[in-house]
Amino acid sequence: MTDGPVPDRRVTVVVITHDRRAELLRTLKSLAEIPERPAVIVTDNASVDGTAEAVAREYPHVRLLAPGRNLGAVGRNLAVRHVRTPYVAFCDDDTWWEPGALRVAADHLDRHPRLAAVTARIVVEPAGEDDPVVAELRESPLSGPDWLPGPAIGSFLAGATMMRTDAFRAAGGFHPGLWLGGEEELLATDLMRMGWWLAYIPEAVVHHAPSTVRDSTARRVVGLRNTLWFTWLRRPAGAALRRTVYLLTTVPRDRASLRAFLLAAGGLPWVLRQRRPVPPAIEARLAALEEAQRKGTARRYVG
């Protein structure tokens, strides 16, 4: 007989954080209490609010990485180097997996060897309502093989997704050039190019209590910049031009948008060096996703 739940040794949870000590400690408390009792790795992206000290003091079982500078999403890459489990579940410092959700996600990855990632349903707290992106995931325009456990999706939300560790590594993880903000789109596209599938599974739930420590304008600048860079890195020339013109004519005409386009233009030399357009089959998926996003409410370059 065992005392209490048996830990799920298939999964490691990776969290990146920067100056959000209170939110991170809440997330770590939740992860310590769920029945899966996963291994946890935290990358502290150069916090100056005592985050690292608090984690070391209150959660000594958590592996804490302190690179000494803010790596953005690449902090996840650093953490995954230390993962020894077949699956890695990403978590933001203001999100947490519901009890049993990690086991559900891992079971799906066990059953489907060509499935690289599963994204959970995201519930926004304290209202307890679905995040607007859930509708886009649920109503994804992509078709996929019959064995998929849920709708095929073309991107994912890092704070609510479990991935096959080997697939993440084979695809190169998150691109260092994008830093943070919509960084998932490029990785998802590269996984699809490699023949992997991604799916939305509503029976697994992740809760999100949006941090009050955020700069919405800065996030918009980086998100728009990264959308442009992804477009120029992976979309064929005609599609990239159309997408760029569409963004030019639809985003707010303000300093934030101007800054985003100037930053994107400044990165053109490295973007063109690394440009690798996707083949027609993958471009057809990206075009379908783009059309759906235009009709949705989750991605709006405002704030």
Image (cartoon, grey):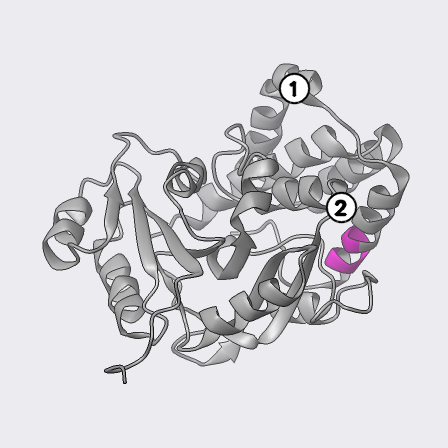
Label 2 sits on residue: 195
Residue 253 as seen in the image, left or right of residue 175: right
Among the 4 quarters of the image, the one containing residue 279: top right
Which label number is shown at residue 233? none
Residue 9 x %, y %: 39, 62
Among the 4 quarters of the image, the one containing residue 152: bottom right
Near-viewer residue (23 or 153)? 153
Numbered range of the magenta stretch: 289-293
Q: Is residue 97 visible?
A: yes
Label 1 sits on residue: 268
Residue 115 x %, y %: 67, 57
Label 1 vs 2, first from the N-terminus: 2
The local secondary structure at tag 1 comes to: helix
The local secondary structure at tag 2 comes to: loop
Near-viewer residue (291 or 250)? 291
Determine if the magenta segment contains residue 213. no
**Relative height, residue 55 to residue 145 (above, below):** above
Residue 133 as seen in the image, left or right of residue 220: right
Q: Residue at x 27, y 62 (%)?
A: 28
Q: Main secondary structure of the magenta part?
A: helix
Residue 61 x %, y %: 19, 56
Near-viewer residue (132 or 215)? 132
**Relative height, residue 156 to residue 77 (above, below):** below
Residue 174 as seen in the image, left or right of residue 116: left
Of the residues shown, which amino acid type is indicated by label 2? Gly
Instruction: Give the crowd class for mark 1: few <14, some 14-19, many >=20 residues within 10 Å.
Output: some
- Disc 1 versus disc 2: distance between alpha carbons? 28 Å
Q: Residue at x 44, y 36 (%)?
A: 74
**Screen quadrant of the N terminus:** bottom left
Among the 4 quarters of the image, the one containing residue 148: bottom right
**Relative height, residue 62 to residue 30 (above, below):** above
Residue 168 as seen in the image, left or right of residue 277: left
